Every structure is written in C-alpha cells, then in structure tokens.
Amino acid sequence: MNKAISILGISCSTLNFQGALQAMLEAHNNKRQTMLLTLNPEICLHALKSPEYFKAISGADIVVPDGFGILFAGRYLSSHRNFFRWLYILATPWITTTSGPFPQRITGIDLLTAFLNLAEDRKIFLLGASEAVNAKLAEELRNKGVRIVGNHSGSPRLEEEKDICRMIHQSEADSLFVAFGAPQQEFWISRNLQRLPHLRLAMGVGGSFDMLSKEKSRAPKLLQSFGL
C-alpha cells in the first residue's frame, strides 16, 4: 500500500510517476470513481484559507506532488529538523530524488501526455480552456487516434453545469480532464463527479490544454530542473 505525507492536512501520495500513470490507466476497471489531484503550493495555501476548497480536494483518491515546494515540504517533514539538516535542505532545493519521501515531481501535463499516449480504448472528454484551444486539441488528438468522445470549452459557472453534465453523460466518456484552473476545476469535479456514473477517472489539468496545443510553452528544461 502506498504511503502518504500530510502537507498542511492534505494527504499526498509517495507514488512515483509510473505508479500514478498506472493508477490512471487502470481506473476504468475500478468500481468506484477516481479523482486525481496534482498538488502544488498554491493549492495548499488556498485550501488552508478556504474550508470549502479543502473539503473539495479532500475527496481526491490520488494526490501526487506537483511543485518543488511540495517536494521541499516533504523533505523537511521527513528530516530530523536539526539545524544542519535544515541548512542542507535550504542549500539543495533542486535535489528531487532519493532525498525525501516523494520520488519525483509529477506534473499534470506530463501525466496527461503519458495517459493520452497509452489510452488505447479509453473514452475521453476534454472540458475547459478557450473554445479555440479546446477544439484544436480535440482535433489534433483525434487525428492521432486518441478516442476523444466529446469536448467542450464551457465554464465553471453553476448555471452551465446541468448542460455540461448532460453532454458528458451522453458521450459515455470514462475519463474526464478539466482545464478550468485551480480552484474552479476541483470545485467542479467535486460537485459533479457522482452525477456522471460513466466516469471512472476525473482530473483537473490547469493550463495543460494550452501547452499540448502549442498555444503556450513550458519553461525550459534547465529552469524546470532548478525548480523555476
């Protein structure tokens, strides 16, 4: 069974990337629905200030560390916290493997990309981002053979939820990726997941649609390696 570290009351799994990806790929075989959350410091701080948001993300079945601040916190919490150990942690924030409870940073876009490459017969619905980005990404993925059964830009507004849920339900999607950005995407999934019995997997992916469609770029690898 996977261990977890509590970061400001949020239980974050020590799964590595392959473990998290495997859990996503196997979710369609599960009887219960799976909500996956990629945890970063901004989400932690928002949850600390908002009991409603804390409750929403506490419903996540899999929480993985996305953000060097989470890796840093895990290293601190698992250390003896003496003065010299603390200096070492401060001096080496870029060391992200074998130096703490979390094997590595697991980003939402990397998980989503890997899942799409291996999804095979999974039925996927893309929700969120701008209308142009959403349509462009859906077309590109379909051309690559990914089974996109539905896509919609939409918004997290409450008055749109009924229509969006109907679209997702009619598509019979088993995997939903929501690009409304935090905290809206987690609130949306928390409110609506049980209304969508076909879904086995739901995940908030922030700006991933924009990057996958090449509308926005990721930071260079060198900067990413230093946690920037």
Image (cartoon, helix red, strand yellow):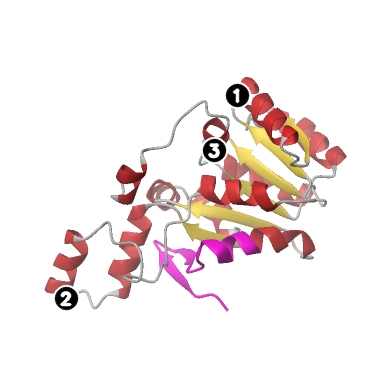
Image mark for residue 130? 1
Q: Residue 206: within the magenta?
A: no
Query: Would you call the spot at circle 3 few (<14 residues within 10 Å), some (14-19), or many (20 or more)?
Result: many
- Which contiguous range is marked in magenta? 1-22
Q: Amino acid at mark 1?
A: Ser
Q: Quadrant of the N terminus?
A: bottom right
Residue placed under numbered mark 2 in the picture:
82
3 or 1: tag closer to the N-terminus: 1
Residue at 79% x, 31% y is 163
3 or 2: tag closer to the N-terminus: 2
* SS at badge 2: loop
Q: Amino acid at mark 3?
A: Ser
* SS at badge 1: loop
Q: Is residue 28 above or below residue 184?
A: below
Viewer can see residue 190: no
Position of residue 59 in the picture relative to residue 53 (left or right): right
Residue 6 screen position, x and y as percent? 43, 67
Residue 185 screen position, x and y as percent? 58, 41
Measured Cα–Cα span from mark 3 to mark 2: 39 Å
* SS at badge 3: helix
